[in-house]
Image (spheres, rainbow, N blue to C red):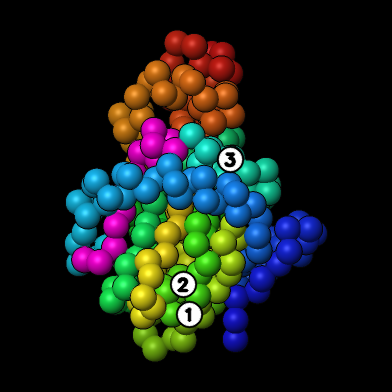
Amino acid sequence: MTLKSFAPSVASSELIAALREDGAVILRELASTELADAVASELRPHFDRIGQKAQSDFNGYKTLRISSILKRSRRSAELIAHPRILEIADAILLPHCINYRIGSCTGIEIWPEESQQRLHRDDGIYPIRMPGMEWQIGVNWALDDFTLENGGTHVILGSNRWKEPRLPQDEPTVQAVMPKGSAVIYMGSTWHGGGANRSNRPRMGLVNTYSLGWLRQEENHYLSIPREVADSYPEPIRRLMGYQGHGRILGWFPGNPDGY
């Protein structure tokens, strides 16, 4: 039992069907190693300076985390707005909203001797569930090779289709093993968690979530990203950050790109 892994050329219908069935899929080498290395290089000083501040029982004490990614890495926008990722988000989210936006962007670096993270669902931040509707999807970009030994993400296959809300019992997990530049895409309702790092090197990833446009975003991009930085990005990135209404009324503001 393994995560289904696809080349970037896979037909969208096949990819989406696998994602709906298993709750997670891998797109191999979707980004170039040059881009993955560039994003990692931009994030490196921030991991070193503040990455330990997010350590906790849930996040781990040998894991570094940083947010406000678009303030820290210009080239991360190429991953966040990757056309293939947005195509998947369109298929999963747009049946339930007019538009969607970034829920959160988090750089995560798991260091040697870190233990396995507690399994969780990303949509657990919202107090209700609606059958047949995904609140969000997540994408974990491999900025290093993800292996069984260095903390490749654990997933319970098919947990997105569990009928009744429940906690995992003894269900087996599979790990996202993939080369640098690949991405594991998973439903917000899929149970998953970071793996234990039993290697002698850290592994870095960039996790982006995309949530329904009428939901409160997990990360407040309006305060975590200075307005002048937001304005320096092209309109598609600004829209993903939340500088758009959900339609012409919900979240309206002067200058709303869709008018009033």
> Quick check: is 182 in the magenta stretch?
no
Q: Position of residue 96 (x, y in %)?
A: 58, 45
Location of residue 14 (image quadrant): bottom right
Q: Are marks 1 and 3 in contact (CB under 8 Å)?
A: no
Task: Tell me the quadrant of the picture where the C terminus can be found.
Answer: top right
Q: Are marks 1 and 2 in contact (CB under 8 Å)?
A: yes
Residue under pointer 2: 152
Q: Is residue 6 left or right of residue 159?
A: right
Residue under pointer 1: 148
Foreground pick, 22 / 46:
46
Which of the two labelled residues, at mark 1 and mark 3, occupies the earlier sequence position?
A: 3
Local crowd at mark 3 within 10 Å, few (<14), some, or many (≥20)? Answer: some
Location of residue 247 (image quadrant): top right
Whether residue 100 can be seen here: no
In the depicted structure, whether residue 1 falls above or below residue 214: below
Q: Position of residue 201 (x, y in %)?
A: 38, 70
Q: Secondary structure at mark 1?
A: loop
Magenta-drawn segment = 61-73
- Mark 3 residue type: Glu
* Mark 3–mark 2 distance (CA, rounded to whole Å): 23 Å
Residue under pointer 3: 78
Q: Position of residue 140 (x, y in %)?
A: 50, 58
Local crowd at mark 1 within 10 Å, few (<14), some, or many (≥20)? Answer: some
> Quick check: is 68 in the magenta stretch?
yes
- Mark 1 residue type: Leu
**Residue drawn 50% across and 75% down?**
147
Count of number-bearing discs? 3
* Mark 1–mark 2 distance (CA, rounded to whole Å): 6 Å
Foreground pick, 17 / 230:
230
Whether residue 108 can be seen here: yes
